[in-house]
Image: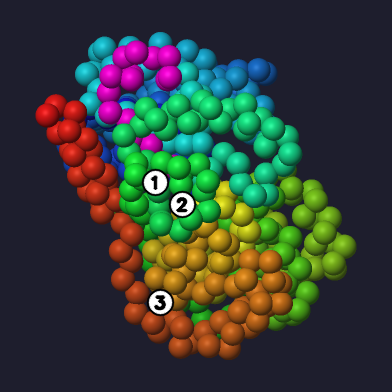
Amino acid sequence: MNLLHIGKFYPPYRGGMETYLQDLVEQQVKQGHQVTVLVHNHDWRLLKSQTTIEQTVPGLTVIRQACLRPVFFTPFMIGLNRQVKRLIDEQSIDIIHLHVPNPSLFVLLWNRSAKKLAWVMRWHSDMVTESSSWLIRLMYRCLKPLETALIKNTQKILISTSEYIKKSPQLQKYSARVSVIPLGLNTRKVTVPTAKPLTDKPFRVLSLGRLSYYKNHRMLITAMRDLPDMHLSIAGGGGLHGELQAYIENQQLADRVTLTGPVTEQEKHQLLADCHVFCLASNDRAESYGMVLLEAMARNKIILSADTAGSGMRWLAHRYPKGFTFHSEDVSDLVEKLEFIRRHYHDITQQAVQFDLSIEQTATDIMNLYQQLITKETS
C-alpha cells in the first residue's frame, strides 16, 4: 500500500505522539509499504518555518511542511492542501491516516482529491478537556463544527483504550466509527536494565514529560515533603520550569527534587535505568494514554500513575504486574503508594513481566483495518 500519515510533529521533536508515529511508520515500511509522513516543520525562524523533505529509511519519506509559529500551542501548515494533492497524484495514495488533535487538518475538508480516499483517524486526545482554559474552550466552540465535519469524512477513529470514550463527549456521538487499538512501542530501541538495588540511597522517583499544567508535577513535588528518604527527578522542558523551580525552593526541597530540563535520548535511557519507580501524575484526559509509561514498562520498571478518569494510564497500570495507581487529586494517597512500593520493592521487582504492547502488534492490527476499509471501498 501507499500510505500517507498527517501528524503534528516528528522526531527529533520530542513527545509521545511523535515517538509513536515514528515507530508506527517505520514498522509499516518493514511490512513492505511505501509511507509518507507529512508534519509541521518545528524549526521556526521568526514567524514561520520552511518545507523540507527527507528520506530517513528506504520506503519512508518525511515532509516537514512550512508552518506558522504556534499560537496557543497550535502550529498551522502553509500549503497543506497543495502538498496533499501532489502526493495523491504522484503516489496513488491508498489510505490517509490522520493524527489528531491537529487544526491544520481542517483544510482537508476542501480537498477533493483527499476526500475520495479512505481516512483513518488516530484520536490521541480531545482538543478540549475538563481542565482547559476558558480561552481554549471559546476557540473550540468555533472549531468544533470543523472537527465534526472531519469526523464525518473519516471511516474509522482509533483510540488506545475503551476508557477514553467514556469521558469524551465528541467521540460518544460517533461511537460506531470508533475502534480500540492500543498504542505500541518499538522495543528494539529499548535496553532492559537490571533492577536498581534498594541499597542505593536515596529511593529514586522519576517523572518524564513536558512541564505543562496537566502533568501535575506540583503534586509530585508536594509529596516529597513527606518522603524524606526519596529523591524526585522531573525530566523535560516547558513553560512551567520557573514556577516549579520557585515552588521547590519555597518548600526547601532543592536537595531532594531536581528539574533536569530537556534531556537527550541517551540521558532519558539513563534516567529510566537509574530510577526505582517511574511516576506519571497527570490529572487530566489530555494525558490520554501515556507513551512514557510504555517506555518504563518495556524496561521492567515499577510504574505508578494517577487514576485519572478517561485516561488510559489506569488501564496500563492495572494490566501490568508492576503497575500501581493513586487517586489523582489525593497527595496523601500518592505518598502512601510510594511508601508501599518502597517497603515491598524487592517482592515487586521479582514479578515476572512479559511486555505485549509492541509496535509490531499495533501495526498488524492497523493494517488489518486498512484492508477492511479498502475492500469495502472497492466492493
- Residue 140, by quadrant, is top right
Q: Position of residue 314 (x, y in %)?
A: 49, 66
Q: Which element is circle 3 on?
A: loop
Callouts 1 and 2 close, C-beta under 8 Å: yes
Q: Which mark is residue 175?
A: 1
Residue sitting at x 38%, y 37%? 121
Region rendered in magenta: 108-124
Report the mark closest to the observer, 1 or 2. Answer: 1
Comes first in the chain, label 1 or label 3: 1
Which quadrant of the figure contains the C terminus? top left
Comes first in the chain, label 3 or label 2: 2
Q: Position of residue 280 (x, y in %)?
A: 58, 62
Q: Position of residue 377 (x, y in %)?
A: 19, 28
Is residue 113 part of the magenta span, yes or no?
Answer: yes
Q: Which mark is residue 321?
A: 3
| Residue under label 2 | 165
Task: Determine whether, in the image, residue 30 is placed left or right of residue 325.
Answer: left
Task: Determine whether, in the image, residue 50 is placed left or right of residue 189.
Answer: right
- Residue 93, by quadrant, is top left
Q: Position of residue 346 (x, y in %)?
A: 48, 87
